[in-house]
Structures are given as C-alpha cells and as structure tokens.
Image: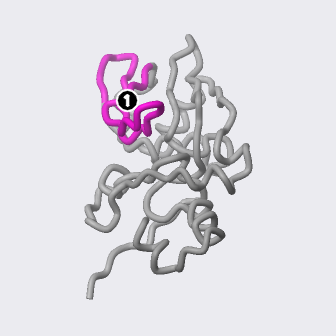
Amino acid sequence: EVTFPTYYSSVCGGHTENSKNVFGDSYVSLQGVSCAHCQHVAKLGQFYWPMAVYDKADISDRLVKRYGSLKQIAPIVHIEPVAQTDYGAYTRLTRVKLIGQNGQSDTLRAEDLRLCIDPSGRIIKSTLCRLEDWDDQWAFLEGRGWGHGVGLCQCGAQWLARQGQSYKEILQYY
C-alpha cells in the first residue's frame, strides 16, 4: 500500500508541478506532467489571468508582518527568482530571493510569496507567471493557471472524463 498527499489545483495552466518544488516533499507519484487538457475546460480568466501590480512598500509590509524574521532585512526592495521550472514558453516560480535595502537577503517559497501578497488567490492566481520590477511596484505578468499546480488538475481531469477516460486512467495520468 502506497500513501501520499492528494494535492490538486483548479487549473494547472499547461503543466503540473513536482510536489518537491512547491511543498518540499518528494513523491514519485507527484511529479509534474504536461497538461494540454485544462485549457479546453477552464474559463479564460482562470487559464490565463491578467497582470497584477502591487506597491513595493505594501508588499514589504505584508511580508514582514507575516514572516517576522524578515524584519532584519526590511524594507524589501528587490525580489528575484532563484528557482523556477522552465516549461519552454512559460515558467513557474518556485523560490524567490528577497533583498532588503540594507543588502541582506532571505529566500521564500514562491507559493508563500503569492499567498502573502494575495491571500484570496484570486488576483495572483498561481506562480506560473513572470515577475517584473517596475520602479516602486512589482508586476506579475503572463499569468497562467489557478492554484499551486501540484497533483491533479481539476479542469484537465474534467476534460479527460469528457473524452471517456475512467477515474483510474485520470488518476494514473496525474
């Protein structure tokens, strides 16, 4: 008998993610897979989402409030990707480096950054996006998907079911 977490997201955006890259755990059954299926079912605003722009000072305040250890580097003036998964035409941020005005830095899982900035998950819908520094703002551009992207893609599974695949085949795929 094999047990593992049952991770799933609403829309993977074209590729599910390895659980190790998002949650730090490592399950052979939770490796990322290509998913061209969710785009057939997901609403346009869920598969692709519009850019989100946030004030740097506001993001710095939110991060320090949520993660007290970041007080030592505050204010945070730069965020750069340090780990990401490259899918060719797009990438998923998995870890970011936060750099303070004093030059000190720390790292954070990209999923934690996303949910700290947007706890609802309705604006920055995933980390499958590009992060840009715009003077006193950070912009999240070219967003795809909705959720962390690990495990089963709900919209992809719905499409596969509509194509006649059994639940066993769908679970085996993801």
Residue appearing at x 56%, y 23% in the figure = 138
Tell me residue 32's x, y (percent): 37, 54
Q: Is residue 36 above or below residue 104?
A: below
Tell me residue 135's x, y (percent): 56, 11
Question: Dot 1, how many residues are within 10 Å of its Cα: few (below 14), some (14-19), or many (20+)?
Answer: some
Question: Which residue bears the numbered disc 1?
Answer: 81
Residue appearing at x 54%, y 50% in the figure = 36
| Residue found at the very far bottom of the displayed protein | 1
Q: The C terminus appears in which quarter of the rendering? A: bottom left
What kind of element bears circle 1? Answer: strand
Residue 92 within the magenta-colored segment of the rendering: yes
| Residue found at the very far front of the displayed protein | 164
Left or right of 32: which side holds 27?
left
Q: Which of these two is toward me, 64 or 141? A: 141
Tell me residue 109's x, y (percent): 38, 44
Q: Which of these two is toward me, 156 or 24? A: 156
> Amino acid under label 1?
Pro
Q: Which residues are magenta?
A: 78-105
Which quarter of the picture shows residue 154?
A: bottom right
Q: The N terminus appears in which quarter of the rendering? A: bottom left
Residue appearing at x 40%, y 72% in the figure = 172
